[in-house]
Amino acid sequence: MPRNKVHFRPQQFASDNYSGICPEAFEAMARVNTGHELAYGNDRWTAEACDLFRELFEAECEVFFVFSGTAGNSLALASLCQPYHSIICHRYAHVETDECGAPEFFSHGAKLLLAEGEMGLMDPVSLEQIVTKRTDIHYPKPKAVTLTQATELGTVYSRERLLEISRVCRNHSLKLHMDGARFSNAVVSLGITPRQITVDCGVDVLVFGGSKNGLCQGEAVVFFNTAAAEEFEYRCKQAGQLAAKMRFVAAQWLGVLKTGAWLRHAKHANDCAAELERHLLTIPEIEIILPRQANSVFVRMPDEIVGAMREKGWLFYTFIGLGEARLMCSWDTTEEAIVAFVHDLKEAVAASGLAR
Ligand SMILES: *Cc1c(COP(=O)(O)O)cnc(C)c1O
């Protein structure tokens, strides 16, 4: 997306990864920036961070840090599958639409099969149909299911829906992977403990996102199925995902987990989306098309309004899911940015002649 030099806004609603590093993570990195330390994750802060995840999930888990969500998802899925297996995901899943084939690449050929489901949520019936459609040797054998929590369409899986899907997985011996790029936003939205929507729902591995919630980088791959984590460190190293200066990745997690900032920031982002939605509801020409459950608002915006907003320097995605406008809030979204956006939107609607 070209950067418009004249109007570029200090805050955008394009993605939560447009934001910077939160102070809790930044300061934590500075605190560990003293002297020499063991490399490649053999330092004490990495060990401490891994223990914190065990506390947070109230479970024995194996934790690894990688540079991106794409790497985390692909390597985690590869660890659950052989090349002749298939992985069932939602039609709009990030692994299908936005990872450049990385899951297929790192699994050496496992095929993604696309399930249906309203509002970005996988339908257990659709899952069951895909899994039972074929049992012959000519079709890749279903082995894993991946869910995104919160979803690409800004919705959140309820615990009940997760348990339903988990039941299908158990019945068909499927492993369950969770893409948690916005896991924190989902936890806040549901007002539930992290364990209740992972371990308790049979999730084998969670990729817990940090970069969209205030970290610079370092998504955490959390294996609740510890057997599946065997030799995962080799996968990470081979894929170029083992940070030499791991202490700075671990420190960021320590910074946000110890202070509760991971929840505070996610709550702020969710609250901002709610605030933005309240404003948008006052503009009848802008239709809200999905329930707002996390930190985004999806709206139907006529092309000429999209164009006018771009002219005013606003960036937002129009290629996610159904191709509507996605307005995404982040840990640092300000009230002023929301007000300025809505002001410009009202102006654009009035100038377009579309105003009712
Ligand atoms: C952002 C995102 C990711 C990770 O993306 P990277 O750019 O590879 O870090 C994964 N899944 C979802 C749903 C995302 O929104």
Image: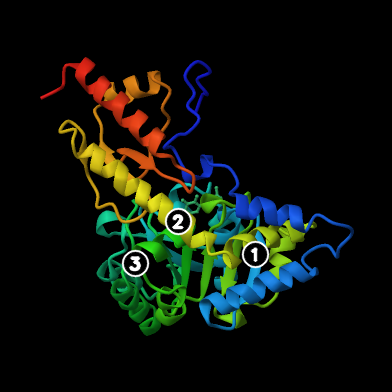
N-terminal of the two: label 2 or label 3? 3
Asked if one can make out residue 108 in the rendered structure from this viewpoint, the answer is: no
Dot 1 falls on a residue whose secondary structure is helix
241 or 332: nearer the eye?
A: 332
Residue count near mark 1 (Cα–Cα under 10 Å), binned few <14, some 14–19, many ≥20: many
185 or 136: nearer the eye?
A: 185
Give above or below for 146 relative to 248. below
Which residue is outermost to the left? 356
187 or 124: nearer the eye?
A: 187
Distance from disc 1 to disc 3, alpha carbons, whole Å, reads 23 Å
Q: Is the shortest distance between ligand 1 and the CB of mark 2 under 8 Å?
A: no
Residue 153 spot, x, y in % from top left: 34, 51
N-terminal of the two: label 1 or label 3? 3
Q: Which residue is drawn at 58% across and 49% down?
A: 22
Residue count near mark 2 (Cα–Cα under 10 Å), binned few <14, some 14–19, many ≥20: many
Q: Mark 1 near mark 2, Cβ–Cβ under 8 Å?
A: no
Question: Residue at label 3?
Answer: 190
Residue 60 spot, x, y in % from top left: 59, 83
Q: Which residue is drawn at 43% across and 74% down?
A: 193
* Left-right relation of 254 to 288: right
* Left-right relation of 95 to 248: left
Question: Residue at label 1?
Answer: 254
Position of the C terminus by quadrant? top left
Asked if one can make out residue 356 in the rendered structure from this viewpoint, the answer is: yes
Give above or below for 134 relative to 70. below
Dot 2 falls on a residue whose secondary structure is helix
Marking on residue 117: none
Amino acid under disc 3: Leu
Amino acid under disc 2: Ala
Residue 284 spot, x, y in % from top left: 15, 33
Question: Residue at label 2?
Answer: 266
